[in-house]
Amino acid sequence: MSTSNFTFRLYTVVSFGDGVINKLSEKVKEFGANKVAIITDKGIRQVGLLDQVEGLLRDGGLEVSVFDEVEPDPSLDTIHKGSDFVRQVGCDLVIGLGGGSCMDTAKAVRVIVDNGGHIRDYAGANKVPKKASVPLIAIPTTAGTGSEVTIFSVLSDWEYNMKITVASPYLAPDFALVDPLITLSAPPRITAATGIDALAHAIEGFVSKASQPPSDALAIKAIQIIGANLRNAVFHGDDVVARNQMSLGSLIAGIVMNNGFLGIAHSIGAALSGHTHISHGMAISLLLPHVMEYNAVSRLEKYKEIAVALGEKLENMNLREGALAASKSVFNLVGDIGLPQHLSELGVKKEDLPLIAKNALTHGQLKMNPRKPTEADLVSILNKAF
């Protein structure tokens, strides 16, 4: 047995469990805050979650302002509108309420409020110069992105039809309130796509070049949890146990992502979403099984572990067959929960695949993929997904 050397990072304090949202005003006051800005979207308002959160804060004697202009795959313009809003209201704490788009927007808004400039200035790794002066509480309303604990903000630069990622420990929320009960309103399609995204975080982190013993243990646990509960969460949205476990799996996978990072699925996914406006979770769902098949040869033992964690029976299979069973298991899961399994179903043009592959090749997450792909490899993966 070889010795282990690693650095494992934890950035965010988490309160997890059914009903923990009721502690919100108490947590805000622990930060010494009185004026709160909520960053969210109109969908959260429509389902009543914003009213619930506002009520909890106001009942606690806190002043509340709301910016609800976040869109799916938030644009750079939205970040600057949000930062202008936060400056104008003069809040002393920010809450990111919603899915990954809302939480990523809240992270990026804090960067601009404190440092000025354009959000493009901070794209890439470790370009944010300091910790934000205003605390951030993240409240996820879906189970999938893990953004409540991650150091990333993924944004859409529509001027160049591409995604950019701001990555810095200074982006991580200070506190996360993860209440699975508020995910009950998430519709089946969003539950499905975000669930596969969480699974991809765990799988790509587990097989990456940056993987390490603590993140590996967490990754396998997240894969087990998501594999066992995603179908129920999609088809029985009021199943509080399935919702609880999906929130837990997503949270754990977010911690994995901070330490093991990601790989090809997210690299191509970013390029695909930027080029076609397909949602992030949908893009990952289409790509993940084919990326797993491509990567399997480089991590046979680990992919076999993934197959077992997903509940596959591997009797009478050799190592290679067991490893490849993992990609088949995920492909079947994607189909079972009603997500498209082919890019052609979403109107993607075959002639655009080489450009998408070329753009994906510039993505920083490729550095941690267990195999170093060529542009031709990425085109091949896209063709299989087509």
Image (spheres, grey):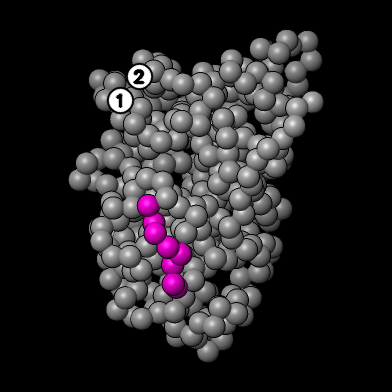
Chief secondary structure of the magenta portion: loop
Residue drawn at x 62%, y 63% is 13
Q: Which of 250 and 245 is in front in this view?
A: 250
Kindly identify the amino acid type of the residue bearing the numbered disc 2. Glu
Marks 2 and 1, how far apart at CA: 6 Å
Q: In this view, does 149 lie to the left or right of 16?
A: left
In the structure shown, which secondary structural element does the residue marked by tag 1 occupy?
Answer: helix
Q: Position of residue 343 (x, y in %)?
A: 38, 27
For the residues bearing labels 2 and 1, Cβ distance under 8 angstroms: yes
Residue position for label 1: 358
Q: Which region is colored magenta?
A: 127-134
Label of residue 221 in the image:
none
Residue drawn at x 66%, y 69% is 20
Q: Position of residue 117 (x, y in %)?
A: 25, 61
Label of residue 375 in the image:
2
With respect to residue 167, does 309 lie above or below?
A: above
Quadrant where the C terminus sits is top left
Q: Where is residue 138 in the image (x, y as percent from the top left)?
A: 52, 64
Q: In this view, does 253 lie to the left or right of 152?
A: right
Magenta stretch encompasses residue 128: yes
Residue drawn at x 62%, y 35% is 211
Q: Where is residue 76 in the image (x, y as percent from the top left)?
A: 28, 54
Q: How crowded is mark 2: few (under 14 residues within 10 Å), some or many (20 or more)?
A: some
Of pointers 2 and 1, the one earlier in the residue sequence = 1
With respect to residue 94, does 303 lie above or below?
A: above
